Image (tube, rainbow, N blue to C red):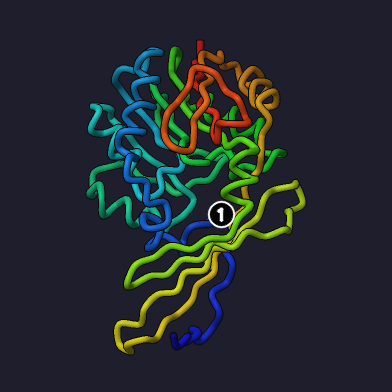
Amino acid sequence: MTLIQPDELAEKETPMAPYDVMAPHYELFVEATDYPRWLAGLLALAVDHGARDGRALDVGCGTGRSLEALLAAGFDAAGCDPSTGMMALARERLGPDVDLQTAALPDVASGPPVNLITAINDIINCVPPSDLDASIAALAGRLAPGGVLLFDANTPLTFSGFFGRTFCRGNDEVFLVWQSLLDRDEEGGYCADLHAFTADPDRFGSWTRAVTHHVQHHHPHERMVAALASAGLELRLVMGQRDDGPRDSFCDETIHTKRVYVARLP
């Protein structure tokens, strides 16, 4: 393999746009074949707790897959994400009429109160501990009375597994290497680099590389409960998500990679 470096090495990304460079490769990287079914199950939890219709906001909407599911379920849904690269793909997916705004927690998109807010796929884990209370409060501030907040949070099992190992995946055009790093950020966040090698369409056998830096933070359950209470939200449900798909009505951090939360604004 011949590696051709760009004229300038791709900079590791800023906190405000951590997915810009990886946006074209995001779908390949996550490659979750049962994602629609997983999303449908999560939305069913929100419906069970009162979010049956009306306005919705998908925070950290990325390429628009979860926002697309909200729209298909009949919600008048908008989305926000800090990455302009990811938002461009969401716009291609969803068309010109969907409200998309660039925003990163603890800020959220502006707009009227909504009946449902979703923040799924590690969104809360991208928030540093020092911003957790402000982020949950910002989400609560966009809810209408009786509105539902649905989100997930990674457990230590994710950080010892996914963040703790180096692996690769790819196809004929892109080769991705997820490199676990021993470094921790100033707030104890877990760090990894994603190296994306892209085939040069003009030179057979030649590749270019871009590197993106990713940091996630573990928020203990007790800390999450306190942040929800401080924001005036009622915790209605906590479930454990296994890496292979099933959700349980309990959470055991030795077997579950995520906690799924449903909270409600009185």
Q: Answer above or below: position of 54 versus 34.
A: above
Q: Answer above or below: position of 133 versus 218.
A: above
Query: Which residue corresponds to the image point at 59% horizontal and 67% vertical from the top-left?
Result: 12
Query: Which residue corresponds to the image point at 26% horizontal and 55% vertical from the top-left?
Result: 92
* Label 1 SS: loop
**Residue at far top of view:** 266
* Three-letter code for the amino acid on which mark 1 is drawn: Met
Q: Position of residue 9 (x, y in %)?
A: 55, 79
The answer to which quarter of the image holds residue 74 is top left
Q: Position of residue 5 (x, y in %)?
A: 50, 85
In depth, the one of 133 and 110 nearer the eye is 133
Q: Position of residue 31 (x, y in %)?
A: 37, 51
Q: Position of residue 145 (x, y in %)?
A: 45, 13
Query: Which residue corresponds to the image point at 52% horizontal and 68% vertical from the top-left?
Result: 195
Image quadrant containing the N terminus: bottom left
The answer to which quarter of the image holds residue 16 is bottom right
The answer to which quarter of the image holds residue 53 is top left
Task: Count the labels in the image.
Answer: 1
Read off the residue under disc 1: 16
Q: Answer above or below: position of 198 versus 142.
A: below
Query: Which residue corresponds to the image point at 32% horizontal and 56% vertical from the top-left?
Result: 89
In the image, is 69 to the left or to the right of 81?
left
In the image, is 130 to the left or to the right of 170?
right
Q: Residues within 10 Å of mark 1 (few under 14, many from 20)?
A: some
